[in-house]
Amino acid sequence: MATQWTRRQFLATLAAAGLSVRMSALMAAPGAEAITRPIPSSGEPLPVIGMGTWRTFNVGGDQHLVSERTQVLKTFFEWGGTLVDSSPMYGSADDVMGEALDALNAHERVFGANKIWTRDGGATREQDRASRRKWGIDRFDLQQVHNLLAWEPHLETLKQMKADGDIRYLGITTSHGRRHRDFARIMEQEPLDFVQLTYNVLDREAEQRLLPLARERGIAVIANRPFQGGSLFRRYQSEPLPGWAAEAGCGNWAEFFLKFIVSHPAVTCAIPATTKVKHMEENMGAQYGNLPDEQQRRQMADYVAGL
Amino acid sequence: MTDVFWFSYSLSDFLMFGPEVFLRLFVRINQDFWPWQGGAVAMMVLVAGLLVRGDKPAKRAVLLLLAAAWIWSGAGFLMEYYGPINIPATWFGWAFILQAALLTVAALVWPWDGSPEKPARQWHAGTAWLAMTALLSLLAVAQSGNWQAIALFGIAPDVTIAASVPCLLLLPRRVRWLFLLLPLLWSVFSAATLWTLGTRLMFVLPLFTLVLTVMSFWFSPRPVQNRD
Ligand SMILES: NC(=O)c1ccc[n+]([C@@H]2O[C@H](COP(=O)([O-])OP(=O)(O)OC[C@H]3O[C@@H](n4cnc5c(N)ncnc54)[C@H](OP(=O)(O)O)[C@@H]3O)[C@@H](O)[C@H]2O)c1
């Protein structure tokens, strides 16, 4: 069941974070109540749209682009987003995120999700520390083993770090449908709070095993590559939305793609990435209004497959 | 991990940045370097002039200027600007510096004992080189639609390498191959990157360098024929 966040709570949180709210944007959001889902292991509500940083936030020392990306992050927060996903694998993305958080003074606002990505199974804490330093935060809310790289030693350390209070949640990630068998085995055996995997209207393999398993085991699911790295827009944006899209709560293609994902009962949030404020606004629109029901979801998948 | 696992990757899975960020590297280095672009242009004209002169000290000076161009584009563009968004660029930066060291050694110790080229041929070589280098530096401008993105010899690595390969013909084939390895590697790396980025006009540059490099492994300039 989706938990609803009231507008009053939302505005109060924003005000506490010192962020201005674009009222017009909020008013435009139907119902203006952000949709959240509880993290199964704690019950903590999480807004259903997070954001990714792969490629989009790797801008190096380009101050012009750093300030553009800061505006993207600001828009994300203004629309009630919290979870930001990054990795040491994403070049300068962690540094740029740190600069943006500084500029917005939003260290308290962000739900920081990062990854451990090193073959060196003994370097878990060191890499966590390095990423924290870049973000300018005391701890990550979520640390994930990136693409199962040296997952056994990293996961052991992450369990210890969680017990010590150095992170709040732990998890593992995969993408592009890779290594789902290993992934399922780890989900069955390990005490995971989160898994991150690829799920979108075209890449639906996770529906077979991983999503039901996540529900069964009480594991939160982050859906990466919600737009298939942008190719969903390249393929379908020129096509018309179906007439019934509005009934399913979708006013544009971004909402169509994202609401398909987050309306799956096992999915906790989706993490689209963008370089543009306008696209961020479109994406965050998916956090408001009604979600498609089971029958509408089937209709959505069939419509896209038939285009 | 199985072979099938690796087949599930495509080139774009390894590309960590978009075309906007890449094209802005040229704009940024030009903005930061301003107004010293004049120095890079002067260096280009000087190399062309030395190719026209073509005597032993001129050949030495060409290789020394190439070494300077490799150092600057390696330590500047690759390590300072490109490296933070693409780790392999930093490794290439070090390789560029190594190549510059090699060029310096060659410039200082190579004896060049053959007979000089015909003046007309040298004139053609120098002017063709200048025209080629100037034209190649405009590809980034054409791609981005921004004059500030001009990719000058001695600043931008692709143009520096493309312009260096013909100059390496000054060295005989038996040692030249050593200097062509890095251009070969870089061109493959750069071509793959630019293709994946979708910057098709700029993709022409490493492709062109690749062809030049492969030809240079075998090519020997014809010796001047004596009439008697
Ligand atoms: N193994 C792993 O752990 C793993 C693997 C893959 C991804 N991830 C995470 O998942 C995140 C999302 O995946 P992704 O970045 O690969 O791809 P994605 O979010 O599916 O797609 C991003 C692309 O969509 C475009 N886009 C976004 N919003 C748009 C809109 N409203 N209209 C039109 N185009 C739009 C963006 O272009 P513009 O910039 O022009 O908006 C960008 O090119 C990553 O950033 C990363 O954090 C994790």
Image: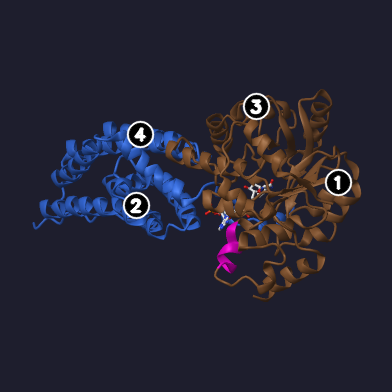
Chain colours: A brown, B blue
> CB under 8 Å between callouts 1 and 3?
no
Q: What secondary structure predominates along the stretch shown in magenta? A: helix
* Quarter of the image where one finds residue B145: bottom left
Same chain check for tags 4 and 3: no
Looking at the image, which residue sits at the far bottom?
A306
Could you classify mark 1 by the number of other residues whose Cα lies within 10 Å: few (under 14), some (14-19), or many (20 or more)? many
Query: Is A182 above or below relative to A82?
Result: below
Name the quadrant of the C terminus of chain B.
bottom left
Q: Position of residue B17 (x, y in %)?
A: 52, 47
Q: Work out whether residue B90 or residue B177 is closer to the camera in this orientation and state it.
A: B90
Secondary element type, mark 2 = helix
Disc 1: residue Cβ within 8 A of ligand 1's nearest atom: no
Q: Position of residue A134 (x, y in %)?
A: 59, 29
Secondary element type, mark 4 = helix
> CB under 8 Å between callouts 4 and 2?
no
Residue matched to label 3: A137
Residue matched to label 2: B140
Q: Give the residue type that dot 1 points to.
A: Met
Same chain check for tags 4 and 2: yes
Q: Is residue A233 located in the magenta-colored stretch of the structure?
A: yes
Q: Which stretch appears magenta?
A: A230-237
Residue matched to label 4: B71
Q: Is A138 left or right of A167, judged from the image as shown?
A: left
Q: Give the residue type that dot 3 points to.
A: Ile
